[in-house]
Amino acid sequence: MGTLKQFKLPDVGEGLTEGEILQWLVAVGDTVTVNQPLCEVETAKAAVELPSPFAGTVTALLHEAGATVDVGTPIITIDVGGEAPDGDAAEPAAGLIGGAAPGGRTAVLVGYGPRTTEARRRPRRAVGTAAAATPGADHSPAADVPQRPPLLATAPDMTTKPVRHGGLEVGRQAEAHAASVDAAPSRAAEQGRRRPRPLAKPPVRKLAKDLGVDLTELTGSGAGGVITRADVEAAAAGPARVAATASVTELRPTPATTAGEQRIPVKGVRKHTAAAMVASAFTAPHVTEFLTVDVTRMVKLRSRIAARPEFADVKVSPLLFVAKALLLAAAKHPMVNSSWDEAAQEIVVHGQVNLGIAAATPRGLVVPNVKDAGRLSLAELAGALAQLTETARAGRTAPEDMTGGTITITNVGVFGVDTGTPILNPGESAILAFGAIREMPWVHKGKVRPRQVTQLALSFDHRIIDGELGSRFLADVGALLSDPGTALAF
Amino acid sequence: MSVSSATEVVDPVPGAGAPHLPRQPDLIQLLTPEGQRVEHPEYAIDLDDQQLRDLYRDLVLVRRWDAEATALQRQGELGIWASLLGQEAAQVGAGRALEPGDHAFPTYREHGVAWTRGVDPLHVMSLFRGVDNGGWDPVATGFNLYTVVIGAQTLHATGYAMGLQRDSAETAVLAFLGDGATSQGEVNEAMIWAASFSAPVVFFCQNNQYAISVPLERQSRVPLYQRAAGFGFPGVRVDGNDVLAVLAVTRAALAAAREGQGPTFVEAFTYRMGAHTTSDDPTRYRLASELEEWKLRDPIARVKAYLSRSGSADQDFFDAVEAEADELAARIRRGTTEMPDPPGTAMFDQVYAEQTAHLAAQQAEFEAYQASFEGGHR
């Protein structure tokens, strides 16, 4: 066996403290070359591939995919062969990043971090300075307590967040605090020993805040009394947790942690969807109109169409007819197929309809669109819709298929509901929701009959589309569905 | 929705049918993305085979350096790296247009220009490793230190150019900036001063389409080169991925500056193929399709195609350049990882040409503080 080298998770952004290993791209036993990608790591800033700093054979993967690893922690061991190429870098323990974080490691702020040997603060020499350090003593939290509280610690307990941003405010806060300390020298004495600021890394502080754990209540199990993630989790789970103590004068509302509550990080498609929905809902003034339609004729026509040879391989769904009706009505009312260009102060009336279909996928909502759908025959449209939704559900929709949409249909009927008030796909001016088709009592030719009935809901951007245009458009879609023969008149 | 074909070169705007920029009859190009030489009535260039091969070598070596630096950052050896990937031709073309006596004022991404000025890559690496503030001699290389403050170097460059003017020196200044910097006040002030005094400065803007994440169309309603008209000097747009066109255009602009005709604004229309820096995730604001389209306009591939087709270079030459690039990368890797950390007192050394009493007192205080720790200070 040759020399073993460990690669420690570097700070791939500026000031990152941890990263999640998304996947390993190599396995134990693999031969790797310098700069060969080893794994993919996601940090708060980006998902990046880590290239190997060594050439050799992988002997161990030290964390599984999915693990969140602190910066500076070894993630992989590589056997680089017989002799160490660089004498001083031979032993893995003397790597550049602070090793497995022994005692009081300071935050890693540059890529190659502090040396392991300096992770511990060196004790001050026993000279007659004003510093209160005990000569030769280990650097313990108690020894760290300043005689005067830190300028920006605004309260003895740590529940109040110090003001850190906005230069003036920080200054004022600091001045006020210093003044209050100077004016009341006895206050600290009355309270006895001031509690030290608990030692914990920022992600752990965040976790504690999220879980409603008061760090001042905990005793750190880490080296040097540092409170670890496990300490916080144990405190959050444990029965011995005390909600408030006498010293905490102001009760902070803790997030309600009902049994079984789950917290899901907002990312990926969910994050994108949320941003798009907020942008749309608060940019375009929405109006929604509803229409209940007897689609019995359309349902009958559907079986006749499906029997035709050119439709043998495609699904003739109610959505297909709704799409066709919308395309015909949009051709008659081109203004519904338009966009608001805020920067140019122009309304862009699109020359073609790129028909978006809202699709529920395992990853979330995506809205791929059929380019220039108005030119397609009914059979071609059926094929395009089938392919679109299939690709979307497989999660393989290409970015270009998701951009450039001009009008959208959302088929809420497939979930068995009647209607909804859809939110516009950002940049578009109209979206049609199509509900479930139900057999309902309906007045048909003067008598109450069981008929196939559905509801349509059209939301439109009221900046572009007036009530009249929206109503006419919706009425036309409804008329085409209730009496498909009128398509000949379009 | 119209889809522009990949081979269409008059409109190298990413994103099919991107409405934000019109077609570009004004784009100066001498070598198409397919490696075809085309002529331009105003910008002729005549290079011999050796000169063409040298340009190719510059492009390849600079890209290899950039790739190695990006990897070293991912391995924890650099604090950060600003990649030039995709902008090699703009930088090498501009850098090779400089005469030895000229002076360049870079941003923090001009590694390719640094290369053409003979700056040792390790001097740039030490800056990004946080070991020093850039180790090269700005006077000897005619290449100023990197400026991280966006656009500030355009003022330095203009002031320097005005100094040259007063010295009656027949040299010119090349000020680098990005598209995002054009929105900065300093840049606009610099251009006004340069115009008012007819300073011998060329503003070389690499329009790589994004100011970190903000696309160009959010910053300018007109193509950037047209802004020069408002300041009263010529503006030209050149295909920034065409090293020959960049060289020709920048040479002409620098020559005009030396002759006393005042400033020129050169917009090198290019694309940042990588992230803004290693701390950035471009997938959050760019579409993959846009990147794919720009890959077809690669600045190196077209030179290679032209060299091969014209018989100006053979496979042995390309292989030799590749080998040289690997050697360079190995030297950069070794040199970077072996860089010694500077002593803490180094920060006092290069603030003033002559240290002030105040600073000397601070240094003494700092040294005493460090000496108060057991084991002394490194």
Image (cartoon, helix red, strand yellow):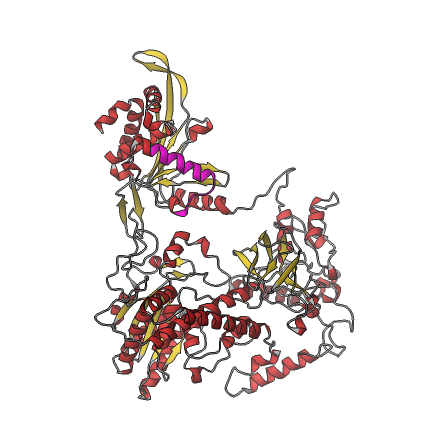
Task: Give percent across and percent down for residue B63.
Answer: 45, 68
Residue A255 falls in image quadrant: top right
What residue is drawn where x is 35% and y is 24%?
A: A306
Task: Give percent across and percent down for residue B5.
Answer: 30, 53
| Above or below, A402 relative to B159 | above
For this rendering, which residue is in front, A25 or B151? A25
Q: Is residue A383 magenta?
A: yes
| Above or below, B30 relative to B194 | above
What residue is drawn where x is 39% and y is 78%?
A: B104
Task: Give percent across and percent down for residue B218.
Answer: 35, 57
Confirm whether residue B264 shows in the render: yes
The quadrant of the rendering that contains the C terminus of chain B is bottom right
Residue A70 falls in image quadrant: bottom right
Q: Is residue A111 magenta?
A: no
Looking at the image, residue B211 sits to the left or right of residue B120; the answer is left
For this rendering, which residue is in front, A82 or A382? A82
Looking at the image, residue B346 sits to the left or right of residue B4; the answer is right
Residue A273 falls in image quadrant: top left
Question: Which residue is situated farthest in the top direction here?
Answer: A447
Looking at the image, residue A388 sits to the left or right of residue A135; the answer is left
Looking at the image, residue B208 sits to the left or right of residue A94; the answer is left
Boundaries of the magenta span: A381-399
Task: Give percent across and percent down for residue A4.
Answer: 68, 64
Q: How many marks?
A: 0
Confirm whether residue A409 shows in the render: no
| Above or below, A281 relative to B169 | above
